[in-house]
Image: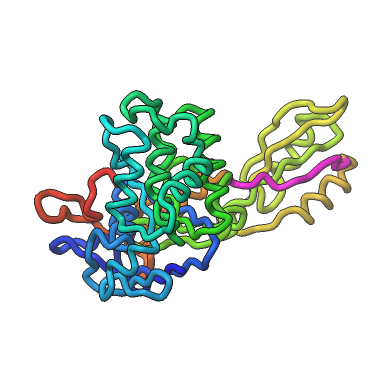
Amino acid sequence: MIEVTGLTKSYGKSRGIDNISFSIPEGQIVGFLGPNGAGKTTTMNIITGYLSAGAGDVKIAGIDVLENPLGAKRHIGYLPEQPPLYPGMTVEEYLDFAYELKGVKSPDQQEHIGQICDMTGLSDVYRRVIGHLSKGYKQRVGLAQALIGDPDVLILDEPTVGLDPRQIVEIRGVIKEMGKSRTIILSTHILPEVSAVCERVLVISAGVIVADDKPENLAGSVGGERTLVVRVAGPKDGVQSLLRGQDGVQSAQPLGEMESGSHDFLVESKPNLDIRKPLFAALAKAGYPILMLRPQDASLEDIFLKLTEEELPGSKPSSPGSPKAKRGEKKEDGPDGISGDGKGDD
């Protein structure tokens, strides 16, 4: 449904995005993550036809965005971070305006808009003035305008920013419902939202894609330490001393007595080393039975930080052309002081 190939955009000597490629099939919800200035907004602006690319191609439902922008845009619904609302209009007036602006050719305008209002939960405020609505309802109005024309693709930029917890849950539910029949790109800084809504995650850093996988698989893509939670029957000090003395163990921290006569420990191995078998053997030999052993998966926040961290000064240089090397490069401002991705607070 969405095909991005070799997409590049430069601002003067600085590249906002650098030769990125990905494809998203029909009916998939994809989280688009990255730190400020990473290139998310630039990428979404090019996909929606708002910004031209320096190189590369974007196709929506097989239609080239550059060659046939109007044809491609008929398949796209876009909700920017600040919804394009008119506070003096009622919800009804605004959605009628959006319908006419998009040139929708539905046989029954009111039926089409009514179905969208039912989906987004706007039926009860349909004749209310937008300026009098809560922020959550304003977000719903923004989603509704994106759905006008029944687009195949939705591009949502920070759809839950500034909402209270109840509103966030409600908007997430709306997005998941919409994703049953549409392809959705969801840009967000709220990482739990990705786990709750998205089937796949794209992570961009310094203009390059550094990860593309399911949320539950991202931990394996960063490598690094393996952390285990181990419950062992035996004296705390004796067990901790044994754990810390094992080859490959980087640290062993007690978590407390969870059962009578046993303690839990957080054990961290050295990078890329599986210590489970030797750990089991050592504890069994010492007469300290293991009552429980489970991996402590890295949080999405930890994974995000590892994937997007900059090279530290004095560290070993990465090989030329690698994503890590690109992330270490200094980014210059674009024209008129614009940051490298075209939006200072991307």
Q: Is residue 48 magenta?
A: no
The stretch in magenta equals 289-298
Q: Is residue 296 magenta?
A: yes
Q: Residue shown at 53%/28% (left/top)?
A: 166
Quarter assignment of residue 18 = bottom left
Quarter assignment of residue 74 = bottom left
User: Does 322 sit left or right of 97 as displayed?
Assistant: right
Q: In the rendering, at what x and y percent does residue 284 appear?
A: 88, 47
Count of numbered circles in the view: 0
Q: Residue shown at 52%/41% (left/top)?
A: 118
User: Does 222 sit left or right of 310 as displayed?
Assistant: right
Q: What's the coloring here?
A: rainbow
Q: Residue shown at 40%/56% (left/top)?
A: 149
For the stretch drawn in magenta, the main secondary structure is: strand
Above/below status of 93 relative to 70:
above
Does residue 320 appear in this view?
no
Q: In the rendering, at what x and y percent does residue 156 appear?
A: 40, 49
Does residue 333 appear in this view?
yes
